Every structure is written in structure tokens, then in C-alpha cells.
Image (spheres, rainbow, N blue to C red):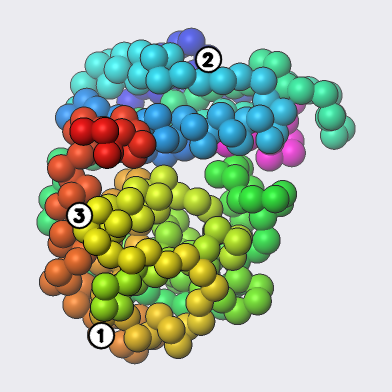
Amino acid sequence: MLIYLNGQFISKEDARISPFDHGFLYGIGLFETFRVYEGHPFLLDDHLERLNHGLDELYIKHHFTRDEVNKILQELLEVNQLTNAYIRLNVSAGMGEVGLQVEPYLEPNLIMFPKPLPPPGELNEKKAVLLKVKRNSPEGQERLKSHHFLNNVLAKREIGDEPDVEGIFLNEQGYLAEGIVSNLFWIKGNVLYTPAIQTGILNGITRQFAILLGRKNNLQVQEGFYSIEQALEADEMFVTNSIQEIVPISHFEGQHLPGNKGQWVQQLLKDYRHYSTSLWSRHSIGRE
């Protein structure tokens, strides 16, 4: 498998960055993960919008465009003979002296990692379990998709490697937050509930798209501060991320849920996949 590193396609064994990269020394870096469907990078514009905003926050002076990233991506898919893939786009601050830097970073490192994925298949259910580890507060005003991942690692160690289980964080105030690698949703009646950004969660790209799809299906969307007891009243529950899409929950805190038989989960995933091979940004929906 070849990866892209600063203008070159090289084997992962040959990849090198300097130990003076402040992404390594101080965690000054961001990443995006997204899925390619039949050669199309789904919601790439949305991922780049979030990435560019984060780069501004970290004083990394580069702005990525669709044309720039998609050109690299299509070459990367070609050299690896992939049409359906997981992609991680990683931007680290670049080299600096040992010590905290206040000046902007002008030469970031860009790495793009691919992994093959099969075409999307049937819905895979998961069980949701509450974590003892609490969701840490964001490092700044909002949570960035940054290199600071110890909180997630500790949570993953807590639940282990079971592929059909997702751990759910409570924040430090005891409100429902998000999954280890996902955002949390549930439906009661005709209302779609999800924790608010102010709980300290990452504003996931798939989270934003699921909210849009819910509204298109005439669900009322409520973002807020919710207790465990409120979620236990759910008719359906699911989690989202850009690789796993919309994942139905079959059990939560002893409660049995419809899982992949849920009417709303099936509808939302059907709509999601309708757009997956063509949509660049959720903002385009409504202009169709």
C-alpha cells in the first residue's frame, strides 16, 4: 500500500517526518477521515471546510481546496487500484524548535493514508455501553479533530476490541456526549435528539448530514443537554461516523432497541447512500 507524503507516493515503510515536527512534539495537527464510494470522496467539501477552520485555529498557514486534495486523492486511488476506500488526511504543523511556538506554521506536513473498503453492505448493529471514562473538555473553545486522542484511547481500552460495541461518553457534568469514534442520536416519536456541541463533542461531518436528512424526512431535530434517563425512552438509537455511516444500536443500558429493523434508521441510511457516490457538500442539498 502506497501513501502520499508531501508530494510523493511512497510505501508506508519508507515514510519519514522529522522528530522536530510540532505535530509530534506538541500535538499540533489535525486529521479528517472520509470514505470514497466508487471513486467519489463523499462530502469532501465539508471535511475540508472543517479542516481549514481548524488550521486557522492552530496557526497552520495553509488552505486546502477540493481541486488540490481530489487531484492527490485520485492519483492515490489509482496507484493503489482502489475504488472504495477509507481515507485519512493528516496535516501536522511541521518543523520547529523545541519549545512552544506562537508564530504561524508555514510548512505543514501533509499525509494521506488509504485503506481498502468493500462496497457498502447491510446494516451492522452495535451495542452501546456507558463509559466510566468521562469525555474531557475541549482544549480550546470547541473540539477540533486534532492529534489529542488520549481520552479516546483510554475509553477504547475500557471496552476492548469487540467490534459490535461502542462506548458512550458522559461529559464531566454527567450529560450524554458522544461515542468513542461517533456521534450519538436517538428518536422518540417524530423527534430526532442529539447532544449539543456545547456538551464538548466533535461536530461530526456525518452528524451534520444526519441532522439534515432528519429534517428532510420531517423529523423535528433537538440538540441539547440530555440525561441517560431521557435516552432510555428512545424508540430507536444510532451512532454516526464517516466510515461506518449510520450504525443502529440494538441495546443500551439493558434496554432492547430495534437495531437494524428500525424504520427511521433504515430510511436515513437509504437516503445517505443515495447521495454517497455524488455529493460534495451537504450545502448542495436543497439546490437539487
Residue 6, label in figure: 2
Mark 3 burial class by Cα count in 10 Å: few <14, some 14-19, many 20+: some
Instruction: Tell me the quadrant of the picture where the C terminus can be found.
Output: top left
In this rendering, does residue 205 appear at all? yes
Q: Circle 3 is placed at which residue position? A: 269
Q: Which residue occupies 53% across, 53% down?
A: 202
Residue type indicated by callout 1: His
Residue 108 in the figure: left or right of residue 187: right
Quarter occupied by the N terminus: top left
Q: Position of residue 119 (x, y in %)?
A: 15, 41
Q: CA distance from mark 1 to mark 3?
A: 21 Å
In the rendered image, which residue does mark 1 sit on? 256
Residue at horizontal 59 percent and vertical 34 percent from the top: 53
Hey, what amino acid is under mark 3? Leu
Residue 62 position, x and y percent, is 61, 19
Q: CA distance from mark 2 to mark 3?
A: 36 Å
Q: Does label 2 or label 3 sit earlier along the sequence?
A: 2
Classed neighbour count for the residue bearing mark 2: other residues with Cα under 10 Å, few (<14), some (14–19), many (≥20):
few
> Gap in Å between the C-alphas at discs 1 and 2?
48 Å
Report which quarter residue 105 is drawn in.
top right
The answer to the question of whether label 1 and label 2 lie on touching residues, with beta carbons closer than 8 A, is no
Dots 2 and 3: beta carbons under 8 Å?
no
Between circles 1 and 3, the one closer to the viewer is 3
Q: Is residue 54 above or below residue 77?
A: below
Which one is in front in this view, the residue at disc 1 or the one at disc 2?
Answer: 1
Magenta range: 20-31
In this rendering, the answer to whether 85 lies above or below 201 is: above
In front of the other: 1 or 101 = 101
- Could you tell me which residue is drawn at 25 percent across and 85 percent down? 256
- Element at badge 3? helix
Characterize the local packing of mark 1: few (<14), some (14-19) or many (20 or more) Cα atoms within 10 angstroms: some
For the point 67% across and 25% down, the residue is 60
